[in-house]
Amino acid sequence: MINPDITLFVQMINFLILLFILNLILFRPIRNIIRERNQIIESFNSDITSLTDEAQDSMERFEQKVLEAKKEGMSRVQGKKGEGEQAEAELIAATNEEVQAKIQEARQKVASDIQGARTQLQAQVQAFSVAVTEKVLGRSIQ
């Protein structure tokens, strides 16, 4: 059994003095170091959070610009395609007009050639008919 005598009180005082000295020398500096480390970690965490948010915002702006560039590119492509189709239509129309004019000119030439050939044939037919009549009659008709 434990006998409470003066040594118990001396041991208690010794324990309290040791506790006070350990607190000053060991526990307070360790707690201060831990507190500083926690503050540094919190600072790093806040920096990481702010940088992550900034990176996310930059990424969203980048994606938005890429999307706008794609839209602008598509609109330019559509515009150039429309211009090309319009130029094609104009070229086809001009070519059609030119072809129609040449066809009309050829028809007129063919018609005039036909008329010239008819006139020539009529003159030849008349000469042949006179020649045939003279042969059949055996005398000249003029």
Image: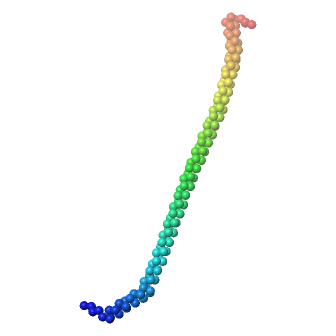
Q: Nearer the viewer, residue 4 or 137?
A: 4
Q: Position of residue 75 (x, y in %)?
A: 58, 47
- Viewer-closest of 139 and 106: 106
> Which coloring applies here?
rainbow
Left or right of 38, for residue 122: right
On the question of residue 124 being in view, the answer is no
Viewer-side residue, 56 vs 85? 56
Quadrant housing residue 122 = top right
Q: Is residue 126 visible?
A: yes
Which residue: 54% across, 60% down? 58
Tally of marks: 0
| Left or right side of 97 for 33 | left
Quarter of the rendering containing residue 133: top right
Q: Quadrant of the N terminus?
A: bottom left
Q: Which residue sits at x=70%, y=17%?
A: 119
- Does 83 appear above or below 38? above
Name the residue located 60 percent from the left edge and 45 percent from the top edge.
Answer: 80
Task: Give the x, y percent position of residue 117.
Answer: 68, 19
Residue at 44% from the left image edge and 82% from the top image edge: 30
Against 135, is 93 above or below? below
Please determine whether, in this image, residue 108 is positioned above or below residue 56: above
Query: In the image as oriented, which residue stretches furthest toward the bottom?
Result: 6
Q: Quadrant of the C terminus?
A: top right
Residue 3 on image: x %, y %: 27, 92
Q: Nearer the viewer, residue 71 or 109?
A: 71
Q: Position of residue 139 (x, y in %)?
A: 71, 5
User: In which quarter of the view is residue 6 placed?
Assistant: bottom left
